[in-house]
Each structure stands twice: as C-alpha cells, then as structure tokens.
Image: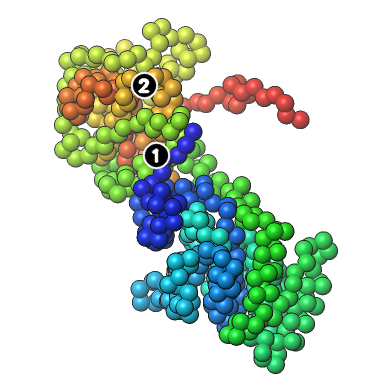
Amino acid sequence: MNAPGHPLLDPLLAGDRRAIARAISAIENGALGSEAIAAGAAARAGRAHVVGITGAPGAGKSTLVNALLGELLRRGRRIGVVAVDPSSPLTGGAVLGDRVRMGEHGADERVFIRSIASRGHLGGVSRTTRQIVDVLDAAGFDTVIVETVGAGQSEVEIIEIADTRVVVCPPGLGDEVQAIKAGILEIADLLVVNKADLAAAETTARELKEMLRLRAAGRAEVAVMKTVATRGDGVAELADRIDAHATSGGIGSRLAGRRRPPPDEVAAVDRAILSRRSVRRFLPRPVAKETVERILDVARHAPSSTNTQPWRVHVLAGAAKERLCRAVASAYDAGEQAPGHRYYPQQWFEPYLSRRRRLGWDLYALLGIGRGDKAAMHAQHRRNFLFFDAPVGLIFTIDRRLERGSLLDYGMFLQNIMIAARARGLDTCPQASWTEFPQVIARALALPDSEAVVCGMALGYADAGAAEGRLVPAREPVDRFVTLAGFD
C-alpha cells in the first residue's frame, strides 16, 4: 500500500534544482501540500551522508564549511548545505551570512546551498531542518552538511539530524570546557579546534583531550583535530576522518532515532483518537476553506491497495450545502428512500442487535424522546440530512465499478479525516443515512452515473452544551475481540 505523492516529488528526485528550492520553501513555510513533500522525501532518505557542523559562536564554522566544500568537490562529491542562520529581526527570514561566505562554491552545479532561519527554534537548528535534509538526501546529494546557529550547552538537536557530528571549538576555551562539556562537546564524533594558528590552540586541543578521558568507558573514540580554515590547513585530514566515520558509524544512522516517535507526539495522536465523537449538534461557527483543504491534504495519505485511492469528496458549505439539504430532507419527509446498496443486514442478530438498540435508546433518552414517539424519532433522524447544522457537509462517492476491497481502503481515508479534524479542534459525524437517497444526491451534485454514494459527514465545531454531547457509546474491552498468540 502506497501513499500518494506530490507534483514536486518526481522532479525533486531527479535533482531538478528549481523543484528542490520550491520544495524546501514549501516545507519551511508550512504551505499546503508540504506534508506530502516531506513524507515523500523521508520515504526515500538514507543514501546521503549527513554531516552536522556545530559549535560556539565565533569558532569559524562557516569558513570551515566553505573549505570542506572545496575539498569534497575535489573528491567528486555532490553536496547539499543547510545553513541555519539567526532570524532577521525585521523580516523573520534568515540573515544570509553563511550563503555569502560560501559564495565561491554556490555557482557549482554540484552544490546546493540553502540558508534557513532558526525562527526562534532552540537546539541550534530550525523546526524544519530535518525535513529539508530529507529533501536534499532524496534529491541525490552524496553529502548533506548542516551548519547550526552558534550553539550553547544544551543546543544539541543536531544529534537527531546528522550521521556524523563535528563540533568546532575556538582557541582559548579555558574554563569554558568544563562549563559546556555536558552539552555540545558530549555529542561530538569529531572535535575540531579551528583557527589553530592562534597561540591558544594547542592548549585548547590538550584540554579537549583531557575532557574526553573523563567520559564513560566503552564510548567511541573521538579525535581532536586542528584546522586553519582560512588557509585550508587540516581540511583534507578532516574530510578523511568524516569519511572514515561514515564507514564505521554508518550512513543513514540518523534515521534510527525516527523509529519511535517522541512521547508528546504519541500523546497527541492518542488524544485525537480518544476524543473523537460522532457529534450530532454543531455551532454555527464557520470553518475556513483552507482548514478543510489541509485536513483532506493530510487524510489523502491513507493507504489503499496498489495505491488506487478510490475516494472522491464533495465538500459543501453555505448555499450549496443548503440546496442539497433541502432536496434530501424533502425526499425524506415524502418517504422516497431508495438505497443504492445495502448498508445493513436485512435481519439483525446478536451481539450487534443489542449494541445498536442500546445506542439508539441512550440517544433518545438524552433528547427526551420516548419509545413509540415516531414523530420525534422522524424529526431527529431528519437532522442527519441537515448535517446536524454543521457549517460543512461532505459527501463521499466511489466509482461503482470497484469492489468491496476499495470500501476497506475508503474507511481508512475517512478515519484519517476524522482524526485530522479532531487534532485541529474540529468535530465530525460520519453518516450512513445519506446512502438512503443516492438519486436525489446525484441530481443535486450532478454526479455521473459511474459514481455511487458511500456516506456523508458533518464537519464543524461541536455544541458543547447540547444534550447529544453527553452520549458516550460503550466500547467492548480488548479481551472480548482480540486473540493473542506467540507472545512470551
């Protein structure tokens, strides 16, 4: 099962520089479709060797990166550079100092340099650095260099982004070595004393080696090197060490940390799932078109067999929604139901009959509808065809030539919509009742004969004070429907 792609992905994967630039801009700005670009790039990441260059301000990181670029070009590499700059206080964009310093290599077709703003993100990088690295990796660059903003003791996010971490130290750290050893010096795969032509460089190198002796036994050896980036001294040896670490540490090792999402992400997904309810009364508060588009943009990454993507969505608001609601509600009042397919079994049986009855009577009890009050039941069911007054209604259709397996795929797509909506503070109600009037819907929406109605869905902000909101359907415990085998 494959996720849908994005129009920029194919040219990006082919190394098209314009597509690369546009993809990075979309990710950095959170544009519509950026999640698809990031997901597509991440699925193809892992070939490039990602080198993080971090360290204290004034250590000469940019100058060293520029010198390293020249050395790697001489070795026949294609190199992408992500230079994280401080944000401009005026525009919020990157202060392009790094791009200027690396200008001598920027025109080379084998080099792609992108400066991005930290935008207040801590850790020495930006919020989107990881995704941008994935883009360059997927685009076929052999080496991707990430230069951080001048980092302090706790700004160590580069450890999650790079395969090889190079920490650059200025001469004359002195007592500062002790102050920061629990921070960025601890993450180093290579330690570099740049500006080694200064008098204090030898002392700084010695202090760093002493610090390394205090590390816990069994940790990998870390080399301490000296460079003079302005002259290129020691840069070839640094490139050799970086290549050696790629061999021993492993290209793509940065991806290992992605196997388990951070606890806060797990909690957010769980909250979205557990707080989802089928809401039957909504507030008149409108939902922005852009919000609906973003929800559907996320939901379209649902899996489908052989990537068939069998869904088609008709999103209605305002007058368009009211026209459909009037047509279907009138047909309901006239008793003109004509289901296009059988949604429920002709004869209910246990345990499904009891569950269905319990839900219905619990809802009616909350609404004060007594058993046998057919007029009140009719009025309540009629509210389905008003989308329960939600500001947005969705009608889902499918090519009727497809088989039942595509409906399984469709269910995963629908769940994605509901969870993506819930994560944004919105609520939904999936509605099978719309399948009772496929011909009326087809006329109202001018559907072709090939399209069949799957269901409807109300989307909006729940009326928290409504009686219906107190309905919490009972769920069977896991041990009632799960069989586990082969576990110790």
Q: Tell me what residue is drawn at x 21 percent, y 19 percent.
A: 439
**Separation of marks 2 and 1 at Cα, in angstroms:** 18 Å
User: Which of the two marks, 2 or 1, is nearer to us in this view?
Assistant: 2
Q: 117 left or right of 261?
A: left
Q: Residues within 10 Å of mark 1 (few under 14, many from 20)?
A: many
Q: Looking at the rendering, which quadrant does residue 252 occupy?
A: bottom right
Identify residue for label 1: 300
Check contact, mark 2 vs mark 1: CB within 8 A. Answer: no
Q: Picture coordinates of residue 247 (x, y %)? A: 70, 59
| Residue 2 x, y percent position in the rendering | 47, 37
Q: Does 49 sit above or below residue 8?
A: below
Q: Which quarter of the figure is the C terminus placed in?
A: top right
Q: Residue at x 82, y 61 (%)?
A: 218
Q: Which residue is mark 2?
A: 402
Residue 330, relative to residue 297: is it above or below?
above
Q: Earlier in the sequence, mark 2 or mark 1?
A: 1
Q: Which mark is residue 464?
A: none
- Which quadrant would residue 244 be assigned to in this image? bottom right
Q: Nearer the viewer, residue 168 or 177?
A: 168
Q: Residue at x 32, y 47 (%)?
A: 291
Q: Residue at x 70, y 87 (%)?
A: 201
Q: The residue under label 1 is which amino acid type?
A: Arg
Location of residue 115 in the rendering, given as x and y in whole percent from the top left corner:
45, 70
